[in-house]
Amino acid sequence: MAADAAEEIRGTAHGTAPVPLSVLDLVTVGAGRTASDALRTSVDIARLAESRGFHRYWVAEHHSMPGVASSSPAVILAHLAAHTGRIRLGSGGVMLPNHAPLVIAEQFGTLEAMAPGRIDLGLGRAPGTDGATAAALRRSDRLNEGADDFPQQLAELTRFLDDDFPDGHPYRRIHAVPGPVQATSPGGVQSPHRPPIWLLGSSGFSARLAGVLGLPFAFAHHFSAQNTVPALDLYRESFRPSGVLDAPYALIGVSALAADDEKEARRQVLAAALNMVRLRTGRPGLVPTPQEAEAYDFSPMEREFVDSWNANVVHGTPDEVRAGLDELQKRTGADELMLTANAHGGDVRLRSYELIADAYGLPTPA
């Protein structure tokens, strides 16, 4: 069992990449563009990633953000599954406290039935939004309660996925369908695959929990870079072999944007940084154009934030991005790099992944 589960988790590095490369898609919507445009770009990037040997493609749950159209990861993943054939697809992640565990088990059981052996279930305990929106999602204003209950919610979700509540449990006769119960029905045949669970985090809580449970771990370096090394160290120190993994496996999310020249890369990441400035100051909107960002009058505090933010965005020419990613992987010891390209235009994002694939000599389509 451990060997089979680990095989679905661990990727293979291609070309000169030091570790497997993957994609994190926020389905960003630029000014003057629509959500339909963003979702078409997601399909294009997923197809490119599959053809060039990227290992997996994840989408992240966000809410009430005009510039991020990924509020329904399961729906987007179903769409991507219909347009790809091999690449692993998953959530990076589903924010479990926003949902009933049974609902997530049903959604990802359905995805597994659509794309057998290709689905990952990444879980986070943050709301993926502001407090008021989280309260609307959860029908409760007791938000800390949801985060504190995360280990219990995780255990419940796992039992629904495995259909193994013990006798006497109030949920013993409740089954997530599609799921293992179908194999125990008369004439039933069920896929041997079950989506691997990943824990996501930007601090030490999920790092420790993933280690104790022997699960793979994904760290949000792209917005919590100062915590990356401590969290990965904690994960490795806490790790206990399980039926899923016999050794730790950690990926990190990395903001990376390559362009044909360095100046263009700087223009693009400045626009993405302005978008973050607005988000962090309670003014979320569509991703601005580079022209708007260049004309924007940043305050000294905003400029300081932009400089700090962009210091953790690996950007520049393809060779510069490759060197930056190599250094980051060496410094953190990450087992996989999951790249997210944040820019106004879908064509810019698509070109970035293409340039990075070329820089590492990843496979080219036949």
Image (cartoon, helix red, strand yellow):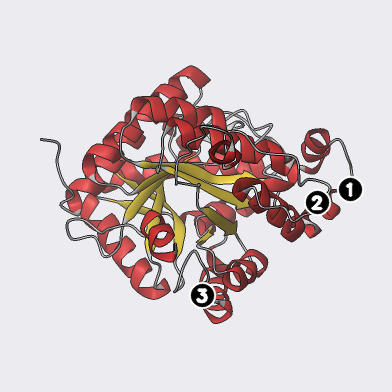
Secondary structure found at label 3: loop
Residue 69 in sight from this viewpoint: no
**For the N terminus, which image quadrant?**
bottom left
Q: Quadrant of the C terminus?
A: top left
How far is mark 1 from mark 2, CA to CA? 7 Å
Judged from the image, the secondary structure of the residue bearing numbered disc 1 is loop
Residue 47 horizontal/vertical position (percent): 30, 32
Residue at image coords 55%, 54%: 197
Residue displayed at 43% across by 58% down: 5
Q: Amino acid at mark 1?
A: Arg
- Mark with earlier residue (1, 3): 1
Q: Could you tell me if the residues under marks 2 and 3 are in contact, i.e. CB atoms within 8 Å? A: no
The image quarter in which residue 354 lies: top left
Q: Are marks 1 and 3 in contact (CB under 8 Å)?
A: no
* Amino acid type, label 3: Pro
Residue 140 position, x and y percent, is 88, 40
Q: Is residue 165 visible?
A: yes
Q: Which residue is mark 2?
A: 146
The label on residue 241 is 3
In the image, 317 versus 233, the foreground residue is 233
**Residue where numbered disc 1 is placed:** 142
Q: Residues within 10 Å of mark 2 (few under 14, many from 20)?
A: many
What is the C-alpha distance between the residues marked 1 and 3? Answer: 35 Å
Please rate how many residues cluster around mark 3, counting C-alpha atoms within 10 Å: few if below 14, some from 14 to 19, many from 20. some
Q: Residue at x 15, y 36 (%)?
A: 365
Assess whether mark 2 and mark 1 are in contact (beta carbons under 8 angstroms): yes
2 vs 3, front mark: 3
Q: Nearer the viewer, mark 1 or mark 3?
A: 3
For disc 1, the neighbor class at 10 Å (few under 14, some 14 to 19, many from 20) is few
Along the horizontal axis of the image, is 134 left or right of 269? right
Residue 251 position in % (x across, y down): 44, 61
